[in-house]
Amino acid sequence: MPADREQLGALAAEVGRFHLHDRGMLRAQETIGALLAEPDDISEAAAAAYLAAVRRYFSGFEREARTHLIDVDRRLGKVSQVQFNLTAERGVTARRVEITRGILARLTELGAE
């Protein structure tokens, strides 16, 4: 039974939007592109080889992207904590400025310089 040409073509088009560096994946992409350009049916073996190449490439790519996402989320958490701490520290400092200005204003009212 031949592979579903429409679905395979849609997958190949989606994969083709990526900037591929892996030689094996590039070769598989070129091969499926050539097969899709022909009017003949695509054999199950050729389709299976392409699907295996896509799975192999994108599984590694997904793992790498997931690891990066976890790292970015961790770093964002740290940044959020720093921002929270600085906002709290700013509030305390602003209150201290307000209080010391009040004291200095009273000194001025009392005529002390």
Image: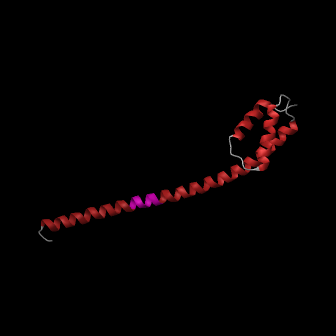
Q: Main secondary structure of the magenta part?
A: helix
Position of residue 55 relative to residue 34, above or below, is below
Determine the residue positioned at 43% across, 61% down. Answer: 85
Q: Is residue 74 left or right of residue 20?
A: left
Q: Quadrant of residue 19?
A: top right
Position of residue 47 relative to residue 67, above or below, is above
Q: Quadrant of residue 31?
A: top right
Q: Is residue 34 left or right of residue 68?
A: right
Position of residue 51 relative to residue 82, above or below, is above
Of the 4 image quadrants, the one containing the C terminus is: bottom left
Of the 4 image quadrants, the one containing the N terminus is: top right
Q: Position of residue 30 (x, y in %)?
A: 78, 41
Residue at the farthest top position: 39
Position of residue 105 relative to residue 21, above or below, is below
Q: Position of residue 38 (x, y in %)?
A: 83, 31
Determine the residue positioned at 65% across, 51% down. Answer: 65
Q: Position of residue 66 (x, y in %)?
A: 65, 52
Q: Position of residue 87 (x, y in %)?
A: 40, 58
Magenta run includes residue 3? no
Determine the residue positioned at 77% across, 34% down. Answer: 8
What residue range appears in magenta? 82-88
Q: Is residue 101 left or right of residue 81?
A: left
Residue at the farthest bottom position: 113
Determine the residue positioned at 33% across, 63% down. Answer: 93
Q: Quadrant of residue 95?
A: bottom left
Is residue 58 or residue 73 the one in the foreground? 58
How many marks are shown on the rendered structure? Answer: 0
In this figure, which colouring scheme has been used for the structure? secondary structure
